[in-house]
């Protein structure tokens, strides 16, 4: 996703023009939710709205490790087995 041209405003909030916010609103809202960023939306250089994270909302869970502990390994998976395998080939 492209970064916005938002500038740091007072209080560390980023300012974003209304036209740019309109074009990139879903990405801006994702950054607010995931990173806790705050934005002041301006129209003709004047602040008109503020977009802030919802208090108490948690960022989305990481996709890494979501299945941790759901599988077990039984026996030795490294050593070869004593049973001979019969390979099936396309020639048969």
Image: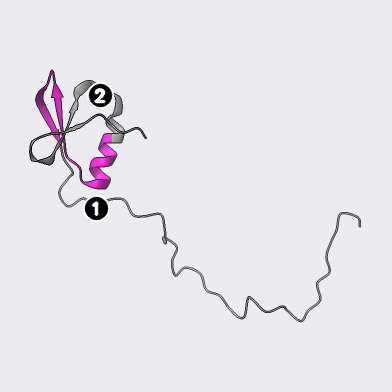
Indicate the quadrant containing the N terminus: top left, top right, bottom left or bottom right. top left
Indicate the quadrant containing the C terminus: top left, top right, bottom left or bottom right. bottom right
Residue count near mark 1 (Cα–Cα under 10 Å), binned few <14, some 14–19, many ≥20: few
Residue 58 image label: 1
Residues 54 and 4: in front is: 4
Q: Quadrant of residue 7?
A: top left
Residue appearing at x 44%, y 70% in the figure:
69
The residue sitting at the top extreme is: 44
Which residues lie in the magenta part? Answer: 28-51
Horizontal side of residue 73 vs 69, given as left or right: right
Estimate the spatial distance between the alpha carbons at disc 2 and disc 1, rounded to whole Å: 26 Å
Residue 48 image label: none
Residue appearing at x 41%, y 60% in the figure:
66
Location of mark 2 (residue): 20
Q: Measured from the top left, where is residue 33 in percent x and y? A: 25, 44
Residue appearing at x 24%, y 52% in the figure:
58
Q: Is residue 92 above or below residue 31?
A: below
The residue sitting at the right extreme is: 92
Residues 83 and 45: in front is: 45
> Would you say residue 37 sits in the magenta stretch?
yes
């Amino acid at each position: 996703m492209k970064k916005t041209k938002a500038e740091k405003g007072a209080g560390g909030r980023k300012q974003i023009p209304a036209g740019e916010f309109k074009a990139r609103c879903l990405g801006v809202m994702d950054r607010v939710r995931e990173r806790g960023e705050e934005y002041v939306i301006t129209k003709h250089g004047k602040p008109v709205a503020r977009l802030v994270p919802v208090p108490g909302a948690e960022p989305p869970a990481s996709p890494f490790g979501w299945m941790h502990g759901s599988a077990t390994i039984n026996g030795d998976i490294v050593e070869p087995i004593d049973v001979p395998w019969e390979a099936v080939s396309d020639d048969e």
